Amino acid sequence: MPAETDKRALLDQLRIDRTDGEAGAAAGRRPWIIGGLVLLAALIAAGLWLALSGGAALPVHTAMAQPIAADGGNASVLDATGYVTARREATVSAQITGTVTELLIEEGDHVKQGQVLARLDDTAQRAALTQAQAQLHSAQALLVQDQALLTQSQRDVKRDEDLIQRNLVSQQAVEQARTQVDTEAAQLQSQRKQIDLAVASVRSAQVQLDYCTVRAPFTGVVIAKAAQVGEIISPFSAGGGFTRTGVGTLVDMDSLEIEVDVNEAYINRVLPGQPVASVLNAYPDWQIPSHVIAIIPTADRAKATVKVRIGLDVKDPRIVPDMGVRVSFLEDRKAATEPQQRPHGVLVPSAALRKDGGEDVVFVLKDKRAQRRAVTLGGSNGDLRQVLTGVSPGEAVIVDAPAGLKDDAAVKAIKS
């Protein structure tokens, strides 16, 4: 037993003790962990400080609130959308069926009234005109012949009347001579009618020949070219897709106007002659002065709308048919019977308004902060909206504010 105890003691002395090493390593890592936590906390604190100090400000677009003019003419009683239409537009075609031999137009060409747009094959029409003219000449020659025969017969009657007094000819011969005069006089009158008929035939053939030349019915601009040289055109829709019904479409640009559909529930706000502010979708910054021409006295049963025609007070080559347009029907100041009160409030872009909890609100830029303002709205004028309370003239309102923008958030105005 003593020998075994001594061996175990010797083995225990040779075994490595790891307890002290692990404890020492853990004690060495502890300062690094504490330092990392302190650094992370410092970074978080720095981020919060930057956010609170405006370093992480949201970029926003702003617009200045505009005061309303003293005449109060910016208020809108109704807004609607429509299209530019041409009151005078025509698909130009020939009055006969024929093959196009010459086409003298292109899209965008300005043409005058009576200007030649196209020509058709006129071989048959020229032949018919030549034939009619020949018949006229023949009838005129026969008229000369009949006139000569009548003159001769009249001389014969006069001679026989002198001879019968001397009993040199019989009474029957005189009567036959008189009958001959009457017959030739009737034939001469008939020939004159034949000449009139021949003249009418020549005129008809000339008209048919003129139909082979297609002319502009009015001054305007070509907006569509519908045929090509070699194609057959006809005023009738015959021949399926192989026959054109016209050579092109012509628009009188001076007849452009706007047509809008107004909900029948609000048609009582529209009056003939009422001033209108029109804005083309293609030129949103250009406001065109306009006026109501007429209210079409019928309603669309399917859409529950009434069509309104609006005249443009300004003619401009930028306005073309079928352009989209937004209109604002303005208050008619001439119809007002009470003294005008000085308008109050400001005008701001409609994009600056938003709904928040059932309220109309805007965000105003103040000291690099977004201030939420509840506002009271008035009328509208195109893209602008009247704000009666909540915003003062000259203040910068935030346009198209981010969805998550909150009151007193840090913001930074940027140029559009």
Image (cartoon, rainbow, N blue to C red):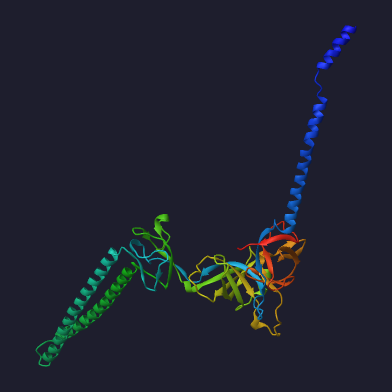
Q: Nearer the viewer, residue 251 or 391?
A: 391
Determine whether, in the image, residue 243 is placed left or right of residue 381: left
The location of residue 174, given as percent across then percent down, is: 15, 86
Q: Identify whether 142 is placed above or below 301.
A: below
Q: Nearer the viewer, residue 247 or 321?
A: 321
Q: Quadrant of the C terminus?
A: bottom right
Q: Residue furthest right?
A: 1
Q: Residue at x 36, y 71 (%)?
A: 115
Q: Nearer the viewer, residue 308 or 379?
A: 379
Q: Identify whether 21 is placed above or below 40.
A: above
Residue 194, quarter of the rendered image: bottom left
The location of residue 350, given as percent across then percent down, is: 66, 66
Determine whether, in the image, residue 388 is placed left or right of residue 277: right
Residue 150, quarter of the rendered image: bottom left
The location of residue 414, given as percent across then percent down, is: 63, 62
Residue 384, quarter of the rendered image: bottom right
Q: Quadrant of the N terminus?
A: top right
Q: Nearer the viewer, residue 306 or 80?
A: 80
Determine whether, in the image, residue 300 is placed left or right of residue 129: right
Determine whether, in the image, residue 343 is placed left or right of residue 310: right
The location of residue 92, given as percent across then percent down, is: 41, 67
